[in-house]
Amino acid sequence: MPAEAFTRELAARVGDANVQTLPVAAGDPPAWQVSPGAAAEVAEIVRLCDRDGVAVLPVGSGARPTRWRSAVGRQRVHVALRRMDHVVHLDETSLLVHVQAGLTGAGLEKVLAPRGLSIGDYPATMLGSTIGGMIAVRTPGKSSVRHGFLEDAVLGVSAVLADGRTIHTRVAPRRSTGPDLSRALCGSEGTLGVITSVVLRIHRRAESRLVAAFRLPTCDAALAAAHLSLREEVKPAGLRIYDAAEARAHLGAELQQTGVTLDDGAALLLVATAGPTDLAVCDRDIVASAVLAEGGEAVDTRLGEAWWKLRGGDPREVPPPSFQVTVTPSRQRAVYHAVGGAARAVGAVSRAHVSRFDADGAVLFFTLVTPGPGGRPLDGARLEEARAACEEAARGAGGWLLGSRSVQFDPYLAALRAALDPRGIMNPGALV
Amino acid sequence: MPRAHVDPDRLRRDLESLLGARRVSMREGDLDTYARDMWPRLLLARRDGRPPDHLPFAVVWPEHPRELVALVKLARALRVPIIPYGGGSGVCGGVVPVHGGITVDLKRMTAIRAVSRDELVVDVEAGVNGERFERELRRRGYTFGNFPSSIYCSTVGGWLATRAAGQLSTKYGKVEDRVAGLTVVTGRGELVETDGPSRAMHGPDWTQLLLGSEGTLGIIASARLRLAPAPQLEVYRGFEVDSVAQGCEAIRRVLQRGLRPAVVRLYDEFDTFINSLGKRAPTGDAAAHGAPRGATPGYGAPHDDGLAPLPAPGEGALPVLPRPDPAASDGGGDDDGVIGKLLALARGKKRGLRQEAIGLALGNARLLNRVADRVARRGCRMVIGLEGSRIRTEVEAALVFAELAHAGARDTGEVAGRAWLAHRYAVSYRMSPTFRDGAFVDTMEVASTWERLQDLYHSVREAIGRHAVVMAHFSHAYPDGCSIYFTFAAHGDDLAEARRLYDAIWRDGLEAATRVGGTISHHHGVGLLKAPYMTGEHREAMSVLHALKRSLDPDDIMNPGKLGLGAPRAADAAAKGGRA
């Protein structure tokens, strides 16, 4: 079909104002961006694309443009869900919210906060994404010690399949009626369907929130204290460990202000506990005892408060970490030291913080800098070289790098896609 | 579609070449045994002396994942179904070989491999008995936290294949909440692993797509399961509320404050009433049947537990679960206990019942339920328990009890709570002997969000109550909703009548659940029993399940006819053909 005719067909479904022809290089097939206003419009667009074999690429906040390139070579429609940003139903009795996929986490928090509700103690950086995007793309760290993995908070998903059918997985607190079909959509990156809405668990705002800061003689001791606390079933709202260099980089001003000094090998452990007051106090005290047992001590609470405020968006522009590794508890110390050794071997220094503790372990964020006081972050070829060496060391010590995939399941995913999407229109460049 | 018949001699030769003669059986007695699970509809026919409608062609006992691979490859080549079999404790007919096939008993795959202490995970093979698994973990200072009442007769693999739940699911979650990875032999005959910190992985979470597949996508060979430290303290307490609605509200408030008791059970008025009939002193019960309670209540000194050799004193508290209530498994069918009382009502017997309850409306379930409504307006019993690390559990228990009191619940003391603990594994063993003369008892476990829970309770109770005596308790509570466990008993004059009644109860009950937005199963699974209702449950999303089936089991050899994947698949193909 000629591009103009297809544009008219799209416009007939979502309105002229919501269709945009995207600029493409000379000779490339045409591309469109449409902004449907309802799930029914998404279904119509997908049906139209299925008819003509046009690729469908869901776009959330549009933060991952690199993924779009993979579909170049065929006609494609980017389905931007940003107009679908409504709360469909807020069930305060069951603490559930049914939201359209285009609403951002931060947008949802704005609706929930005045009612004393919250999406929960997840990493604040996560909240900038759309809910649909958060669910559709699996990355480590979308989890909370207190509430578990974000996917565990997904009670139901509505999605449009390649043939234009809309599915709604049944909403129930737990089920025993076959596999959890909503999990096929979670992490599928738009290859099995376009997620149009999600039913999410939410939480009442914690009655109390306490923060505390501790200094430990080594990073190993800090990790040991963290795991000791978690084994005592502490459920903190946030937990983070900085090694000394990272602490100076992130909280330098506060360290100076509070007069807390850190030896080079030392570490800072920060914790926020939340819940009914007695329980929040109990959890904080358990962490304090674990720190004591590992030879640490409490330091000025203002350090903890500063960390809690800065979580997520740091206005002081601490450089983003060079790379991150997901590591199960027993491997964390080994990975930390292996990366340190690998960095030194190439004439660099690694500093790290550990956060996003969950049932799988935690995420270690490493920043590679130049040696000497006031180390500057590496960049360019120097960074690439050092990062490659450090990532190899981390993998060798048992860490999992971002973007690992179980290749064993590739044929099964391909067959699943073929069964649901015989024409291969759903985000064809993803997950291959 | 798999073949309905194979050459038995060839099959035997092929199987024996894989496993040796000792681990292959085609004996009549074995085939008969493996033709069923504990599905009451099958027990009805059994009590009537009927042979099974479907028999497997052979039963095999593999010992290693590579033998599972070989078996699936053989089955693919022969186009013969494979039916994985664990403890046989299912109650939905999930292992019935409706198209014949090779029944693969996994109970010889029993390795338990602990992983480093910081990880809080364990690798375990699918055939491990549930109680043995938990006992091994307790010895090492851990718990898996899954305590189904079938724990003595179910396997870890069976739990995973059905998304089972234990009694303490409010704290520990259902089994699917505690799986870090699976090793599965798919219907293509390939051994695949889903483990690794799943959140570092791109793509769908295959673990969650294989859990609950009831053998229709592959055989779960082993799993990496998440553990919790063994509890240092258990606190149990009884409470009483005026009504189901008040009790549910109290539970909801507790959970939504972020408090996590291990178990909360609320019995409806009729259940409470039936339970109160001819009650023995709970303390006496605990002493007679449960493990004695020592410093670690519930897992105390086990000199007569009859389960395992004991460690020397000083090796710590031996983790021993209370053994099954001997009265429950004596096979005498003495109509003792809750189910006996309920059956007595259904049959119209007067033994042990108060005249006011049974003097009216015998044989008329609807009227009897209404009468029960009236006589039973005496409040509802509630049991609540917490366990975990010592200090935290103490603090949490105080908060929970205060919240319950604030919601109007009356504390009935610790003894009332512990009485439940002593008998919590008793019920499963009562089923079989009580099936006599067309009488049957069964349970239906549905669930919904809190918003719909009272609707669910009333509509399902009404639907079952058209045909049977019914009582219910609310258990497995979560911050967002709760499960309701209906127990019902009825009596048909002959097998045909009993089956008709049985099917009508399930049809009306499950349709009512679907109508008000609940799920048709919280933890028993689907099997054959609920297969006809899967389309109502999942509607268009069934197409995703069909796609999974095509991907993982392209030849439809894995436990065919289950999970609602039987007939609709042909319909699906026809619809596709029509569209082309």
Image (cartoon, rainbow, N blue to C red):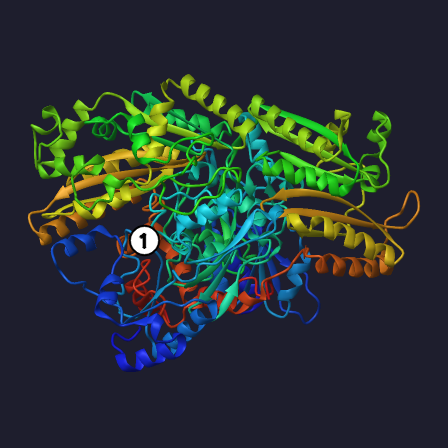
Residue B497 locus on image (x, y percent): 9, 50
Tag 1: residue type?
A: Val
Residue at the outermost right position: A372
Quadrant containing the C terminus of chain B is bottom left
Q: Chain of mark 1?
A: B
Quadrant containing the N terminus of chain B is bottom left
Q: Nearer the viewer, residue B537 or B308?
A: B308
Q: Residue at x 12, y 58 (%)?
A: B49
In this picture, residue B250 sits left or right of residue B141: left
Q: Nearer the viewer, residue A111 or A215?
A: A215
Residue A165 locus on image (x, y percent): 41, 57
- Secondary structure under badge 1? loop
Q: Nearer the viewer, residue A41 or B515?
A: B515
Residue A23 locus on image (x, y percent): 68, 61
Residue picked out by circle 1: B526
Residue A169 visible in image: no
Q: Residue at x 48, y 45 (%)?
A: B144
Residue A425 locus on image (x, y percent): 52, 65
Q: Residue at x 26, y 25 (%)?
A: B281
Residue at the outermost front position: B312
